[in-house]
Amino acid sequence: MASKKVDINTANLQDFAQLSGIGVRKAQAIIKYRKAVGGFTSISDLSEVPGLGYGIIEQSRLCLECTVASKSRHRAARGRKSRSDVETAESEVPIESPQPSTSTCRSLRSRLIETPSTSVSDDSLTSNQGKTEGGTPPEGVRAREEDNVEGEVEEDGEEEEGHWSPEDNGPQVSDDEVSSPTEIDSAPPSPQDHRRIQRVNTQRSRIPILVGKMKRKSYGCGEEVWKPPFKRPCRADDFDSQSTFGNLKKTTIIPSYAGGHRPRIPSKENPPPRLMEWLQTFQRWSNAERLMAVDELIQICEPTQVRHMMQVIEPQFQRDFISLLPKELALYVLSFLEPKSLLKAAQTCRYWRVLAEDNLLWREKCKEEGITETLVYGSNRLRRRTGCRSPWKALYMRQHQIEQNWRAAELRSPKLLRGHDDHVITCLEFCGSRVVSGSDDNTLKVWSVITGKCLRTLVGHTGGVWSSQMEDNIIISGSTDRTLKVWNAESGQCINTLYGHTSTVRCMHLHKNIVVSGSRDATLRVWDIHSGVCKHVLMGHVAAVRCVQYDGKRVVSGAYDYMVKVWDPETETCIHTLQGHTNRVYSLQFDGVHIVSGSLDTSIRVWDVESGNCLHTLIGHQSLTSGLELKDNILVSGNADSTVKVWDITTGQCLQTLQGPNKHQSAVTCLQFNKKFVITSSDDGTVKIWDLKSGDFLRNLVSLDSGGSGGVVWRVRCSNTKLVCAVGSRNGTEETKLLVLDFDVEDKKT
């Protein structure tokens, strides 16, 4: 509340805004209204301001005062004028005029009633009573009339049809003309009176009678009251004595029209005035200006008008444009949808289903997801099971279900493959439906993952088997007896025995019919597995060779001499010696462009194979990096510090660290990964699955009862639908065996 009284005729925006319950917006409305009416005559006039209620006025009444100007106000004559013209006319000095007496009003009314040319109602007569020569209504009425006046001035500066103005009611009658009631009563109607009455009635036919609040006061005319031409008086016979406010709201007042003619409804044939001019102006505007105009138009529209806009606009966006396009273009549009969205689109209608099951479309989706598995299980059976016509879609849906099985489906009971007694399983290979396990019991065993039976036992080595490779039906094994043996997996026969190394064959890599072996004798040998001939010997390391990779062109080796070497096997020359590690190199990965090496010095290094330069040194692990897997520039490393990390070798950035409350509790022994998951095993007796992109732990796939007390998972190998784990212990707490877990959606038999 303000500390001093505020004069409502002179106060500015700030003075009104500081009053309790008013604020800036209501203050602006008060000032706008004050300018329109030329000032207030009392504090009660504030109730006519749009947005102000009696409660707000009474709350601030003690802080308000009203100083009335010495001259009376009048309403400027208005015809079809713009808003600015109206405000200018009303701001001019009002013309004083005495109010007509009661006798004058009555005489004038009786004279008009007796006019034979047309009938005049009380409303049309009294609409001129109490006006001055300039056509201005009494001061107290003028403010209440403004509610109707404000709504009649359109944005383009012209008033609506039906607006009252003094000129429309014909010549004004001064006191001089009606100085004597007798003179008026006895005088016959003049032609001027006839014209005046006709114009009054014509004006009434153009003015809709509005239902609104009506305040009736006396302004010096006795019981006769001046009323705006927009309202008709509320008569006693309209409502009974029991009328309530709710009844009044329901009462309908029918508008009257001169001659029975109603206003024409706007249509295309009968558009509103200046509509085309407005549309042409809109077309000349820029896009930004049009958007602004639309925003402003929506803000001033009523809910019914906005609802009409929605009814017109929504159908424009509900057209089935896919069905209208040629099939090639429709398929091109659908190719941008995700597979999940394609499945939803297929439920729209029959034609969309035909498009959404296009075989070539789903072939591209399989290609994007890296699903390269062929339909070896029979496309017809898959099509019947999935209910779709596209073999590629059937394959995609099958793969999706398999991924869901890995993530969350209930684990089936694993198959148990027993056969190495209590010996350690040192190497594990998985190809097709066969698994090969090598042990320090000097044997290898070939298993069927479908039946869980041991198909073959490969006997021939005289020492423990420490390395192996498998491709199709060919198995290569390396042993502490310093030899390599080539086996036929189908028959179990030893095809060739490769002699040459002088110590344990610790590692090997098979590419087509060439195998490269690394030994503790610090040499590497290149063999032809079909002929059994040693083609090349690579010498240069000064300690045991622990890991080797071969891509058919170059050989990369890591050794206990802290070195990584790149060889040309054809010339038996060392191309690069990669120095940087400060301890033994235990693991390698090579994709033809990058070399990744893991060492006991806790670091991982990324090298360029052409230049031999170290591109990145990946720091983060705290111990020996024993396992590495590299695919599409994504590297996953397992460490003896019980953590697994995901790296981008192009940037050297660590993308994820697989740890947290569900991390391994001991050294990571082995890992596998694809585009979706990472699978890790550990000395703590568990096998865990993680989400590759988010790094989130999904669940335990294997959890040995003896985990933590000696049970160990030594090796894991995965296919698209199977997981094979080699488990056991070094203290006899866990039986040595293979576990086979199946995540396929259907059973298959060989």
Image (cartoon, helix red, strand yellow):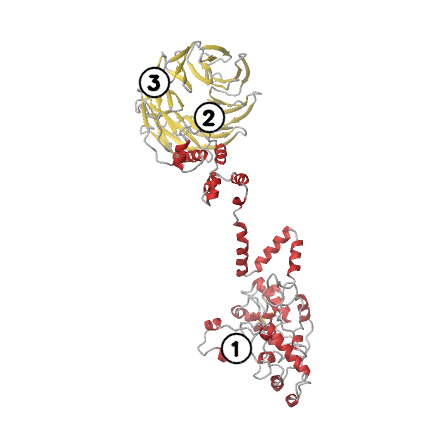
Which dot, 2 or 3, sits closer to the camera? Answer: 3
384 vs 185, left or right, is left
Q: Mark 3 points at which residue?
A: 456
Q: Which amino acid does label 2 sit on?
A: Glu
User: Measured from the top left, where is residue 683 in percent x and y?
Assistant: 37, 26
Q: Which amino acid does label 3 sit on?
A: Arg
Which of marks 1 and 2 precedes in the sequence?
Answer: 1
Few, some or many residues within 10 Å of mark 2 (<14, 14–19, 20+): many
713 vs 29, left or right, is left
Q: Nearer the viewer, residue 700 or 563?
A: 700
User: Measured from the top left, where is residue 26 in percent x and y?
Assistant: 57, 64
Q: Identify the element where label 2 is drawn.
A: strand
Q: Quadrant of residue 610?
A: top right
Q: Is residue 92 visible?
A: yes
Label annotation for residue 234:
1
Q: Mark 2 points at which residue?
A: 629
